[in-house]
Amino acid sequence: MAELRLLPWTSPDGKPCYLSADHDGSRLSRLADDVEAAQLRSGEQVLAGARAVLADRAAGERAVRFALTRAGESLEEVLRIAHSRGARIPAAYER
């Protein structure tokens, strides 16, 4: 029986979405891989921006709040990816 893969997006009402597939090469699985890669790239950009805002002593409250909000969103995406990938690691590779 196929394992369920946690997808890198949620339903319109915020519930997790899962994929049941026998192999990683399905069209939806490849789309999920592409979305995860884009989310990780975005997270790197958000981190760089947040660091720049924090390093700027003249940055106002709005800039700091915006950077923190985006950083929180990116962290949520990265944690979802980590959880999804961790769940797909075969038991033989787990420590």
Image (tube, rainbow, N blue to C red):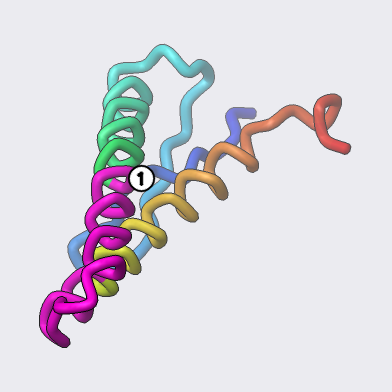
Residue 1 lies in quadrant: top right
* Residue at x 15% of width, y 78% of height: 58
Residue 94 lies in quadrant: top right
Work out which residue is located at the far front of the displayed protein and give it.
57
Question: Percent x, y for residue 91?
Answer: 81, 32
Looking at the image, residue 52 lies above or below residue 56: above
* Residue at x 47% of width, y 34% of height: 20
- Examine the structure image and report whether residue 59 is included in the region drawn in magenta: yes
Q: Which three-letter amino acid code belongs to the residue tagged 1?
A: Pro
Residue pointed to by mark 1: 8
Looking at the image, residue 74 lies above or below residue 64: above
Secondary structure of the residue carrying numbered label 1: strand
Task: In this rendered view, identify the residue nearer to me: 25 or 74.
Answer: 74
Q: Which residues are the magenta region?
A: 43-67
* Residue at x 54% of width, y 45% of height: 82
- Examine the structure image and report whether residue 80 is included in the region drawn in magenta: no
